[in-house]
Image (spheres, rainbow, N blue to C red):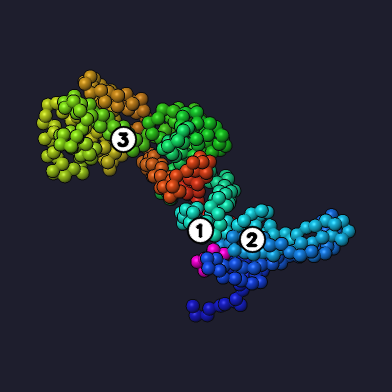
Amino acid sequence: MAKPTFTTPDIDSFCLVDQLGLTITGQRLEEHRAVLECRVLHHDPWCRECGAEGVSIGTVVRRLAHVPLGWRPTTLLVRVRRYRCADCARVWRQDTSSAAPPRAKLSRPAVLWALKSLVIDRMSVTRIAAGLGAAWHTVNDAVLTAGTKLLINDRARFQGVKVLGVDEHCWRHTGRGSHFVTVIIDLTPVRNGTGAARLLDMIPGRSKQVFKTWLDAQSADFRDGIAVVAMDGFTGFKTAAAEELPQATAVMDPFHVVALAGDALDRCRQRVQQDTLGHRGRSGDPLYGTRRTLRTGADLLTEKQHQRLQKVFTEDEHVEVEATWRIYQKIVAAYRNPSKIEGKNQLEDVIASLRRAVPRRLHELISLGRTFNRRAADILAYFDRPGTSNGPTEAINGRLEHLRGTALGFRNLAHYITRSLLDTGGFRPLLHPHLR
C-alpha cells in the first residue's frame, strides 16, 4: 500500500459493540474467557406513562455471550441503569434491545457469527457453543431461530426453480415411528451449469400424498415454472407430479435405472447360486466371487476380470446370469454413449427386447421389463434433456448423512429438517445482507 490510511483506534468498533448502542468501559481477562464491561449509550430518563423525568435508582447487570475475540470466548457485562418516576412510581430500565432481544443470552453479532459458523464453516453446534462459552441448548435455539427467520423463511429461495428432484431419505435408523422423509431438491443450477443442487424442503413421510400435498401448498407461479421433475422409480412421486404439474416432464434418472438393472442382476445371481449350490454365496464360490465384477461396466474391466467372467459363463448352469448381465451392460453402455441420440436408440432397443418373449426362467428380467415398459417415456426423456439427473439428489443425501454423523444423530425431526436446510439449502450467507 503506497499511502495507507488509518483511523484512530476505536475499541468499540473493533469489538463490534458500536452498533449495539454500547460502549466499553473496562475489560477483564480470565483464564478461559474475556469479559468486557459495557454501558448503554442511550439515556432514557423520561417516564413513558406521565412524561416526567425519572430518578436513577442504580444499575443491574446483563450478561451476553459475544463474538469470540482473541481465540477466547467473550462476555459482555452490560450495566443497565434503572429509573423510577417520582410522580407515578413507575420503574423502568435502559433499552438494550439493540444489543440483544429481551431475555436473550447471545448478542446479535454472536448469533450471526454462530449462524455463519454453522452454514459456511460447517461447524457443529458443540464447537460453536464452546467458542461462545454458552450452553449447547442456548446456542442451538438461537441459531435455529435466526436461520429460520433470515434464510429458510425467505420466499425468494423458491424463485427461478425450473427443475425439481424428489427422493426419499432415511433420517434415523433406530427408534419407533417413521424413519423416512421426502426431500425436494432444486436441480436448476445443475441443469444450467451455474452451481450445485440445493435442498428446497424436507417433508415427513414418503408417499404420493406427501409429495402431492407439498406441491399443492406452493404458489401457482412456482408450480407453473416447473419444467422437469427428476425422480426414482417410485410410482407415487410420478403420479403426484402428473396431477399437480401436468406441464412438467418426468425424468427417471440414469442412477435409478441402472440401479434397477443392477438389482435384477444381483437377484438372478443369488437365485442361481441357491439353485446350483443350495446355499448363499460363500468365499470360493464362483458366482459369489464375481459379485462386484458383474456390476462393473464392460469397458472398465481388466483382462483378469474378463477371464474370470468368461470362466463363470462357460458353465451351463450360469447361462441365466450371463443373459441378465448382458442386458445390464447394454443399459450402462447406452448411458455412456457420447451421442445422446445413439444412446437413446440403444436403450429403446433394450426396452423393446424386454417387451418381447423373455424365457420364463429369467424371472428378474421379466420383472425389470414390466417396470421399463411402464416408465419407458420417463426413462427415455433423460436423453432429450441431458444434465437432468437425480444424481445430485443422491449427493445431497450423502451430505445429510455426514451432517447426522457430525451431530452424532438427531432425535428431533423438526431440528433435523431445519439443520438440513441450513446445511444443504444452497445459502450464500456471505452475500446475505444480514451476514456480511
Task: Give the residue type that dot 2 points to.
Answer: Arg
Q: Which residues are magenta?
A: 69-74
Q: Which residue position is annotated with label 2?
A: 63
Q: Residues within 10 Å of mark 2 (few under 14, many from 20)?
A: some
Q: How many marks?
A: 3
In the displayed structure, would residue 29 be above or below residue 332?
A: below
Relative to 64, 210 lies left or right: left
Of the two numbered discs 3 and 2 in the rendering, the one whose residue sits closer to the viewer: 2
Q: Earlier in the sequence, mark 3 or mark 1?
A: 1
What residue would you read off at disc 3? 259
- Residue at mark 2 to residue at mark 1: CA–CA distance: 17 Å
Few, some or many residues within 10 Å of mark 1 (<14, 14–19, 20+): some
The residue lying at 20 percent from left, 28 percent from top is: 279
> In this rendering, does residue 47 appear at all?
yes
Measured Cα–Cα span from mark 3 to mark 1: 44 Å
- The local secondary structure at tag 2 comes to strand
Q: Is residue 193 left or right of residue 105?
A: left
Which of the pair 218/345 is nearer the observer? 218
Q: Residue 48, image x and y in percent?
A: 82, 56
Residue beneath the point at 62% across and 56% down:
105
Q: Tell me the quadrant of the picture where the C terminus can be found.
A: bottom right
